[in-house]
Amino acid sequence: MYQTKAIIWLVIITLLAGCCATNLHAANATKPNIVFIMIDDLGWSDLAVQGNPLVDTPRIDQFARQGMRFTNAYAAAPVCSPTRAAVLTGLAPARLHITNHIP
């Protein structure tokens, strides 16, 4: 008796969860366009959009105005090779044993 009720409840919960998952999936039908720009040896103040009056970067400034800027970030390492490896793999450079520049 107890097993039959448990199985019935399990079937009902599974069916309800399936219905809810279908509605959530339909709501997220449009995917955002994401462009990730990573430039080696670029400091935080090397672009006009960051307030540098000596540099003229009109296309990057327009791109920044129309999109979303993440200004609170850091590089995984002070040289480019470990940072690239971290971005490509999602792991910290120390886990990859890449801590220096790879020529």
Image: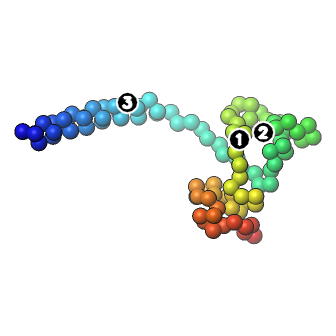
Which residue sits furthest right?
Answer: 54
- Labelled disc at residue 23: 3
Which residue sits furthest left?
Answer: 1
Image coordinates of residue 34 in percent, x first then y, are 61, 41
Q: In which quarter of the image is residue 10?
A: top left
Q: Which sits earlier in the primary sequence, circle 1 or circle 2?
A: 2
Front residue (pair 42, 28) = 42
Q: Which sits earlier in the primary sequence, circle 3 or circle 2?
A: 3
Q: Mark 1 belongs to which amino acid?
A: Asn
In the image, taking residue 60 as reference, residue 95 lies left or right, namely: left
Locate the N terminus by quadrant.
top left
Q: Name the residue under label 1.
A: 72
Secondary structure category for the residue under label 1 = loop
Image coordinates of residue 17 in percent, x first then y, are 30, 35
Q: Mark 2 points at which residue?
A: 60
The residue shown at (30%, 32%) is 19
Q: Distance between the residues labelled 1 and 3?
A: 34 Å
Q: Mark 3 belongs to which amino acid?
A: Asn
The residue shown at (75%, 70%) is 103
Q: Distance between the residues labelled 1 and 2?
A: 18 Å
In the image, taking residue 10 as reference, residue 74 lies left or right, namely: right
Front residue (pair 85, 67) = 85
The residue shown at (80%, 45%) is 44
The residue shown at (76%, 58%) is 78
